[in-house]
Image (cartoon, grey):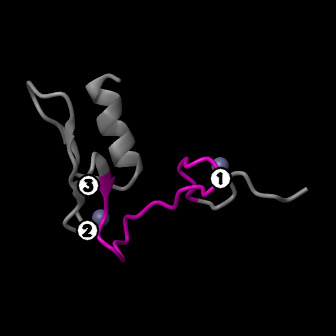
Amino acid sequence: MPRASLTASLIARGFDRSHAIPFERGARVWCSQCEALCINGVPCHERGCPNIVPTCRECGGLDPERTCCREDS
Ligand SMILES: [Zn+2]
Ligand SMILES: [Zn+2]
């Protein structure tokens, strides 16, 4: 994955201060609202961070409206 889109995906997940690291494969995870960490390669906000973006339990995608994979019919 190109570095630019990795950073963009981090920002989409609420890590609004994330930026690519020159000469390294990856990006620094950074959130303006908490001490965001990368745990086992997975970027995580601290509990209760207002920047947390909900994710879908079904497909794991971003689900800010909580409408993804809804069982409505
Ligand atoms: Zn955060
Ligand atoms: Zn889904």
Give the tally of numbered discs: 3
Q: Is mark 2 within 8 Å of ligand 1?
A: yes
Measure the C-alpha gap from mark 2 to mark 3: 18 Å
* Image quarter of residue 67: bottom right
Q: Quadrant of the N terminus?
A: top left
Task: Say which residue label 2 marks.
Answer: 33
Q: Earlier in the sequence, mark 2 or mark 1?
A: 2
Task: Say which residue label 3 marks.
Answer: 39
Measure the C-alpha gap from mark 2 to mark 1: 27 Å
Q: Is mark 1 within 8 Å of ligand 2?
A: yes
- Residue at horizontal 31%, vertical 59%? 44
In the image, residue 69 lies in the stretch drawn in magenta: no
Q: Quadrant of the C terminus?
A: bottom right
Q: Position of residue 36 (x, y in %)?
A: 23, 61
- Residue at horizontal 18%, vertical 28%? 25
**Discs 2/1, front:** 1
Element type where label 3 sits in the image? strand
Task: Give amino acid for label 3.
Answer: Ile
Task: Say which residue label 1 marks.
Answer: 58
Q: Is mark 3 within 8 Å of ligand 1?
A: no
User: What residue range appears in magenta?
Assistant: 43-64
- Residue at horizontal 29%, vertical 37%? 7
Q: Main secondary structure of the magenta part?
A: loop
Q: Position of residue 38 (x, y in %)?
A: 24, 53
Element type where label 2 sits in the image? loop
Number of other residues with Cα within 10 Å of mark 3, as a class: few under 14, some 14 to 19, many 20 or more? few
Residue contact between numbered discs 2 and 3, judged by CB atoms under 8 Å: no
In the image, residue 62 lies in the stretch drawn in magenta: yes
| Residue sitting farthest toward the left | 23
